[in-house]
Amino acid sequence: MSTFQAPKGTYDLLPPDSATYLAVREAIAAPLRNSGYGYIETPGFENVELFARGVGESTDIVTKEMYAFETKGGDRLALRPEGTASVLRAALEANLHKGGNLPVKLWYSGSYYRYERPQKGRYRHFSQVGAEAIGTEDPVLDAELIILADQAYRSLGLRDFRILLNSLGDKECRPVYRDALQDFLRGLDLDEDTRRRIEINPLRVLDDKRAEVQKQLVGAPLLRDHLCDGCKAYHEEVRALLTAAGVAFEDDEKLVRGLDYYTRTTFEFVHDGLGAQSAVGGGGRYDGLSEMIGGPALPSVGWALGVDRTVLALEAEGIALDVPAATDVFAVALGDDAKRRLFELVTELRKAGVATDMAYGGKSMKAGMKAANRSGARYALIAGERDLAEGAVQLKDLESGEQEALALDAVTSTLRARLA
Ligand code: AMP
């Protein structure tokens, strides 16, 4: 038994399942690459203040779940719990917003860290692919991002997901609503923790999953009835654009998000086969975040989709992605001289773009062929001293079992043609 195990709340991605993760990342990124989003990569850790902004609404989730630490040099850093703040920080730092070409559209893919209570679909280390459109207030952008996420999920074959949509208002109407909601919530019979939340982040109370809380929330004031005209018109436009694009959504007046900087459009993708951790992705507009981190006013919108949960959603729907075979050709040599020559051929095939592997370590022919079959390769290349003396190798089609001799100098072109 190995002494070490993966830390609590984490898991390793191993072949062959890891190929599905790569394919999911690719599938989410593809519509973004195709729509003017440029790739951005930021550090895995940031100054802790980037995420823990003062007191109030922001600290509710993020600080509690953050991996924060002090470095030997005395810097207070945190492993990133989410992508948006980092991407905006990087864009501001590099003055991307001053290039005169707004919005700045970026996409990213990486690991995120939250000190959560682990369960299926909820980990302490997880993967997201995300997108941000920075610096422009335009309902077309909100719609575009939702449509691209929908497209990504559909390209994976997913069907049992729903899009929940809401508007959180802006700095005009949200505070008025917040007061009204607080008045209502303070009159309820709630535990101490929840009462504290009323004062810090009352919208989050609407999100409480407990039945005894939900029962009392009937009749709570709804943001919908408090939206200012500007927010109302904006939201109607987003809804109309989605409808015109044929993207179905559900209005969910109670949808609020864990992170405090969201304004106006907010949305979540939920999958019905996932149980408690049903959110596969989410996002929205965050018009106030730039100013919160010391930048100019830059209205922006974005989302992050969870790779881990998307993989679980595929499993729930019984979808096996058609991932290309890792190996097309597998070479088996008999004897050291043959191995040397065959290795040259393998290198040549690899250079020519043919996915090729071989038997190592002086395996017998039988063990070598077993390895060839296990690799999933379509063809085996087999060579002994006699074949090579004749300038040939044996090419075996592992599907049909047919075998033929092939001149050494014809191997690459023949295999390339057959595998094309
Ligand atoms: P959030 O930033 O909380 O809106 O998260 C966006 C997406 O990331 C969620 O919809 C999940 O798919 C995924 N996600 C968030 N937290 C976790 C976690 N602890 N474990 C796995 N996936 C997560």
Image: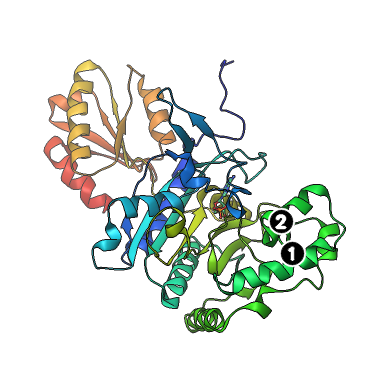
- At x 25%, y 34%, the residue is 394
**Closest to the observer: 233 or 183?**
183
Looking at the rendered structure, the kind of residue marked 2 is Glu
Q: Quadrant of residue 119?
A: top right
52 is higher (above) or lower (below) than 245: above
Q: From the image, which quarter does the C terminus lie in?
A: bottom left
Q: Which residue is mark 1?
A: 182
Q: Is residue 161 visible?
A: yes
| Quarter of the rendering containing residue 198 | bottom right
Report x, y in % for residue 120: 66, 43
Kind of element beneath mark 1: helix
Q: Do the numbered discs 1 and 2 sit on residues whose CB atoms are within 8 Å?
A: yes
Q: Label 2: which residue?
A: 199
Q: Quadrant of residue 212?
A: bottom right
**What colour scheme does the image use?**
rainbow
Q: Amino acid at mark 1?
A: Gln
Query: Where does the image place residue 186, in percent across and percent down from the top left?
Result: 81, 61
Q: Residue at x 14, y 42 (%)?
A: 410
